[in-house]
Image (cartoon, coloured by chain):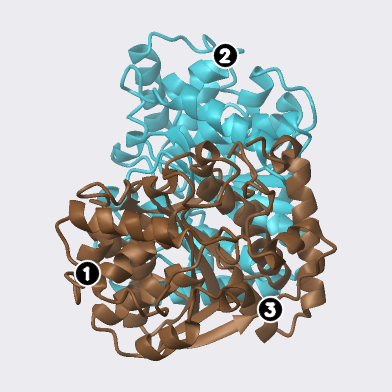
Chain colours: A cyan, B brown
Amino acid sequence: MTRLVLCAGTSRTAEIDGISAAGATTDLMVHTPSADAEILTYGRPVRAPVVPVSPSGCPTPAAVTRAVAAELGVETTVVDAGLAEPTGAPTVTVGARPGDDIREPDPVPSAPGAFAAARQFGRSLPDDEIFLAETVPGGTTTALGVLTALGEADVLGDRTVSSSLPENPLSLKREVVAAGLSASSLSPGAAADEPQVALRRMGDPALAVVAGLAAGALETDTAVTLAGGTQLVAAAACLRHDGYEGPLSLATTAFIDADPTVDLDRAAGDLDLDVTVTDPGFSDDHPGMAAYNAGEAKEGVGMGGALALADRAELPMETVRSRFRTVYDRLLDAAPEQAVPEQ
Amino acid sequence: MTRLVLCAGTSRTAEIDGISAAGATTDLMVHTPSADAEILTYGRPVRAPVVPVSPSGCPTPAAVTRAVAAELGVETTVVDAGLAEPTGAPTVTVGARPGDDIREPDPVPSAPGAFAAARQFGRSLPDDEIFLAETVPGGTTTALGVLTALGEADVLGDRTVSSSLPENPLSLKREVVAAGLSASSLSPGAAADEPQVALRRMGDPALAVVAGLAAGALETDTAVTLAGGTQLVAAAACLRHDGYEGPLSLATTAFIDADPTVDLDRAAGDLDLDVTVTDPGFSDDHPGMAAYNAGEAKEGVGMGGALALADRAELPMETVRSRFRTVYDRLLDAAPEQAVPEQ
């Protein structure tokens, strides 16, 4: 059996102006992981007061993952990987707490404990195969932080990490990472072979939980697919720096593959990843799909993994798009006042 | 769509010697709701260190509910209704805390808040229909406490409430309820029309959450089936005393119907309940089934509701029994040292 496990958490790094598009406004972004968890579980927000959309109205990739998981009957499980707001989705507790801005000296003190509890949970899962996904606004910046601390900042090419924004604010991310390293008295590569140090000092709680879950599942011979973009590449780097030398798969979207700031081939080579890229064939005549085609969101909440599962099950992408349209319409109905953000 | 919602909680009332069989020993019983949640979700315990069995080795009814839910693809959601031990099952949080022994003056101070949060959650659920289930050791005693406080102690006949033990320790339960009323300075019927007082002073957190969920779901025209035995009758009494006058269904097992201490017809009449009784046709040649035929466990974790769903879907009871055997065998494999308790 296949289970998709969503690690939903927060990092105050997302509050830095201009760093993330995972919410209509910075104030609303803190609700995004809680709402994503609900959309994955129920098909729409239940308790969370928002529908996660970007400033331009691009819907959360949770809509795609939900559409596929419901259609294929894939079991989904949400882990509270540091949520800061309540969610109506059932969550597994591993002791993760909301992460602070990585420019603080010890932004994720719960990382080691959450990594250990997630590892134990990963060991105990009864599944043959798990897909690991994340939702954490600001997560590409913390991923860059972790990769830099591990000495792998160039693993995705000389520009590295993707963005939920069409124009990747890379210089801002680099500034934030540099300030974070300074606050933690770390130099690039100082946490090589010490992924838990990198996660605690430069990461976020969701990445710590993804890495712990993967480590535990792999120890018990559960097949693991890292379902996501550059944040999951950072999780792969953590596993390699933790000493894991076995096979490792990453499933992501065509939007990440098309991102000129990301060199997936290089990541695949350097980290020995088996990379699957799936294109949902989005058309520009649908506002939600057009936003993805314009480079927004790109990935998240396991979207690339869900598309890979659809492809493997020979579910036509036309059906995926049709189900996505249905979920999208339901999301707009759920909170019309939030679908078109104010700004 | 139909969702089965399991409200999993604890009450220290279960620690009273001889009051419950929902665990191999009193010390292990506190883990039973956490393990039941895992069995419903994953088919076997994941984090909980026990397989819930009675002192004689009768398996938890969670095994039956899991067997049916997995076969029919029924969505299941677990609400943390006052768990005292960690669970690896994802849970929804409504602010419920473990309940104290009802002989204490204020055993469930979290009941009003949990009722309100559960009501709000029940209002927001996207389903057409929900089945509400409980797992709370000692729950028939707290149910008797609530019924007595509401002035409905005779609603199930002059002996009232069932038991997970073949020999119902009714006189002990009555002593405990009398002591509880005294500690809370209540007389029988003193909390009529005030179910939240009854739940807080004489109940348990799981019953408070069941009642709140039902109230909220009914407000938004979600069909509600109370899936269980006399504890769910107590939930029905709470709803009637809360002023709800619409239709209300209860689905329970043939083992409850056969219990000479329970008069289901009377409860159906007094509380205007549409009662469905389903017989899984257990045979004595299987140790798990024979225990049920001998009057153990009888109901719990939504077993009667699951059987009703199987019947409605025209799933043959032979298939239900076969799937139950598979889950039962997996449970024994999971923790052979606990399958035959030491006592």
Camera-side residue of A257 and B63: B63
**The residue tagged with tag 3: helix, strand or loop?**
loop
Q: Which of the chains bears the disc numbered 1? A: B
**Disc 1 target residue:** B188
Q: Which residue is drawn at 61% across and 13% down?
A: A193
**Disc 2 target residue:** A194
Camera-side residue of B154 and B333: B154
Discs 3/1, front: 1
Q: Where is residue A60 in the image (x, y as percent from the top left)?
A: 47, 58
Q: Disc number at residue A202?
A: none
Do the residues bearing badges 2 and 1 touch, measured as CB atoms within 8 Å? no
Relative side of A1 to A18, left or right: right
Q: Residue at x 67, y 54 (%)?
A: B59
**The residue tagged with tag 2: helix, strand or loop?**
loop
Amino acid carrying mark 3 in the image: Asp
Q: Residue at x 62, y 29 (%)?
A: A157
In the image, residue B226 sits, relative to residue A291, either above or below, namely below
Discs 2/3, front: 3
Quadrant housing residue B181:
bottom left
Q: Which residue is drawn at 67% across and 35% down?
A: B342
Discs 2/1, front: 1
Q: Which of the chains bears the disc numbered 2? A: A
Screen quadrant of the C terminus of chain B: top right
Q: Where is residue A123 in the image (x, y as percent from the top left)?
A: 68, 34
Dot 1: within a 10 Å radius of its alpha carbon, few (fewer than 14), some, or many (20 or more) residues? some
Q: How many marks?
A: 3
Q: Which residue lies furthest to the left in this view?
A: B185
Q: Where is residue B221 in the image (x, y as percent from the top left)?
A: 38, 85
Say if residue A120 shows up in the picture: yes
Say if residue A141 shows up in the picture: no
Relative side of B79 to A160, left or right: left
Amino acid carrying mark 1 in the image: Pro
